[in-house]
Amino acid sequence: MKRSTLIMLFTLVLGATSGARERTILTLDQAIAIALEKSYQMKALRLSLIQSEKNLVAARNRFRTNASLALNTPNWRESVSEIQVAGQLPVYNTIGDIRYQGTLDISQPLPTNGSLRLQSQAYHRDVSTYELDLDQTKKRSELISSVSLRFTQPLFSLNTLKLNLTTANLQFERTRNVFRRSELSIIYSVTSAFFDLYESTRSLQIAQDNLRQQQELYELAAKKYASGLIPEVEALQMEVDLAQSRSDLLSAEVALWRNEDEFKQLVGIQLQDSVGVQTDFLYQPFTVEEETAVQRALKYRSELRENEISVELARLNVKEVDARKAIRGDIDAFYDLTGVSDSNLPYGSTWADLWNSSQSDMKRRPHNRGVVFSLSVPLWDWGVNAAEVQSAQAALENGRLMLQEEKVTIQRQVREVVSRVRESESRMRVLQKNQQVAQRAFDISLARFNNGDITSQELALDRNRLTQAKTSYLKAYIDYKLATADLKRKTMWDYEKDRPLVE
C-alpha cells in the first residue's frame, strides 16, 4: 500500500468590496452528501420517483371500495313557463321548485374488471304553480327515495384493471432503478467537478510558486547584471519570463473562479457563498480482473433491468392494441327500489311524514329490475388495427434489440474503464517519479546558476520542466481517481471495500 496525502485549502473572494465571508470547508464526501440533498438533479429525481410511486398507489387503490356523496342544499328556482293547450293559445304559468337532494354512491371494483355499484338517493321538494287564468297558486310537498344495485361485467375483453396495475408496478420499478443509477451518476459528476476544482487550485498554487521563483531569479539576475556578471540579454530574458509568470497566474485565478462556480451550482450551494475544499487522498492500489468486472456489471447494472421492463411494457402494449379488434361483450344488470310519498299529503307536511309515506310506497310498488347482454363484433376497419398491431410489434422487437445491444455496450464500457484504470495508475507512478527527478534537476541548476556556471535560459528550461512535471503528475493523479470512480459506477462494485453498491 502506498499512501500519498495531499491537503489543500482555498477560498475565493467574490469581490473587493464584498467583505469577508465565512468559509464552507468541504471534503469530497461532504460535497457528495450536499449534492444528494440539495442539487437540482436530485430534487428532480426525487419528484419523479414520488410521481411514479403515487401512480402505483393509485393503481392499487382502484381495486378498493370507493364512495361519494353529492348534496344539493338547496336547489331553488322559480320561472315563467309556457304551457301548450291543445286547440288554444299558450298559457303562461309561474312554476316554482325548491329541492333538497342527497345521493350516496358506493362502488366496488371487481378483479374481473367489472364492478358492483350501490346507490341510495333521496330528495325532498316543494313544488308550486301559479295559474294565471284562475289567479291561484297550487302547492305540493313530496319526497322520493330510491336504492339501487348495479352490476357490470365486460366479457371477452382485456382486463384493463389488472393491466394498469401491472404497468404501474413496472413503471415504478423502472423509475426506482433510474433513480439509483442517476444517483451514482450524480456522485460521479460531483467527484469529477471536485477534482476539476482541485486541479484548478493546484494549478494556481503551481503558478504562484512559479511566480515567486521567477521573481527571485529576476532579482538575482538584476544584481548580476548590475555587477557585470551576465549580459543584458539574460537580464531582459528574466524580465520577460517574470511577465509570463504573472500572466499564467492571472489565467489560473480566472480558471479557479469559473470552476468554483460550476462546482457550487452542481452541488447546490449558493453562488455568493465562499467555499473551501479539504482533500485527503489515500492512494490504495487494487487489482481488478476484467472478466470479473464484466460479470459484476452484467449482474448489478440497472440499465439491463430497465430495458427488460421496457420490453415487458411493449409486450403489454401489443396485447392491448390487439385486443381492440376482439369481440366484446358486456353484462349490465340492475335492481332498483323506489318510493314516492303520497301526493294527497297536505303542503308543508313534515319530513318524517313524507319519509314514512315514501317507504310505505317503496314496499308496495313493484321493484325495477333488468339485465342486458350486449355484444360488439368488429367487422372491418380497412386494416387500421392490423397496422397498429404491427407497429406495436415492431416497437417490441426494437426493445429486444436494444436489450441485447445494451449488454454489449456494458461489456465494452467495463473493458474500457478497466484499461483506463490500469493505464492511469501506471502513468501516475511514472510521472510521480518524473516530478521528483525534475525537482532534483532544478535544485542543481539553481545552484549552478547562482555560481555562474549556466545561463538564465538554461535555468528557465529546467524551471519549465519542473512546472510541466508537476502539472502532468497532477493530471495523472486526478485521471486515476476519476477512473476508479468511473469503474465503481460502471460495475456497481466498491473495490476499496470489496462489496456491491446495491443489494
Image (cartoon, rainbow, N blue to C red):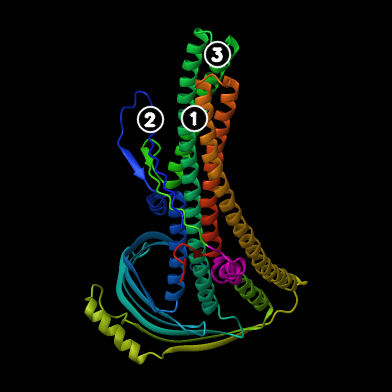
Pointers 3 and 1 in contact (C-beta within 8 Å): no
Residue 308 lies in magenta, yes or no? yes
Find the magenta span and give its range. 287-309
Q: Mark 1 points at which residue?
A: 207
Residue 424 lies in magenta, yes or no? no
The CA distance from mark 3 to mark 1 is 21 Å
Q: Nearer the viewer, residue 249 or 396?
A: 249
Residue 365 visible in the snapshot: yes
Residue 91 visible in the snapshot: no
- What's the amino acid at mark 1? Ala
Hey, which quadrant is residue 346 in on the image?
A: bottom left
**Element assignment for label 2:** loop
Q: Residue 235 carries which label?
A: 3
**Element assignment for label 1:** helix
Q: Name the residue under label 2.
A: 13
- What's the amino acid at mark 2? Val
- What's the amino acid at mark 3? Ala
